[in-house]
Amino acid sequence: QVQLVESGGGLVQAGGSLRLSCAASGSTFRVNALGWYRQAPGNQRTLVATIRSDGNTIYANQMKGRFTISRDDAKNMVYLQIDSLRPEDTGVYYCKYGAHGAISSGDYWGKGTLVTVSS
């Protein structure tokens, strides 16, 4: 079992930055990838980025440039830095543990943290 708890969301003005954090616990934490997904209002949950323990990353094409994923295995944390925030970045950001760059039935999910970007 893996438990994931996100934090760092909130209300921010367009052009600002946020750093989301996800604390992971569980004995298999370091085996698979950690990542972030976003669910905008009325839309499906979509990939932002995932990262493996070896540092290999996968970003959704539309997320390249303003989003940076990182992980600290010593602290059991994964982070998502979002710069130059836009209103369309609004949504719930979920932390995921499991498949790298894809959704699998064996994935674990956090409850999400809400990011609201005002124009």
Image (tube, rainbow, N blue to C red):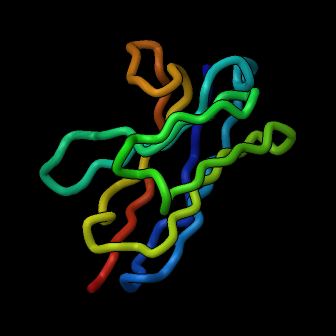
Q: Does residue 91 appear left or right of residue 64 in this picture?
A: left
| Residue 97 spot, x, y in % from top left | 55, 28
Which of the 4 quarters of the picture holds residue 116? bottom left
> Which corner quadrant holds the C terminus?
bottom left
| Residue 72 spot, x, y in % from top left | 78, 44
Question: In the rendered image of this protein, does residue 55 appear above or below residue 64?
Answer: above
Instruction: Tell me what residue is drawn at x 54 percent, y 71 percent.
Output: 18
Instruction: Tell me what residue is drawn at x 46 percent, y 51 percent.
Output: 64
Q: Does residue 66 appear left or right of residue 103 in this picture?
A: right
Question: In the rendered image of this protein, does residue 112 appear above or below residue 45?
Answer: below
Q: Residue furthest top?
A: 105
> Which corner quadrant holds the N terminus?
top right
| Residue 37 spot, x, y in % from top left | 40, 43
Which of the 4 quarters of the picture holds residue 29? top right
| Residue 56 spot, x, y in % from top left | 66, 31
Count of labels in the image: 0
Question: In the rendered image of this protein, does residue 31 appear above or below residue 95?
Answer: above
Q: Does residue 91 appear left or right of residue 28 in this picture?
A: left
Q: Residue furthest right?
A: 74
Question: In the rendered image of this protein, does residue 71 appear above or below residue 104?
Answer: below
Which of the 4 quarters of the picture holds residue 12? bottom left
Instruction: Tell me what residue is drawn at x 31 percent, y 40 percent.
Output: 46
Instruction: Tell me what residue is drawn at x 39 percent, y 66 percent.
Output: 115
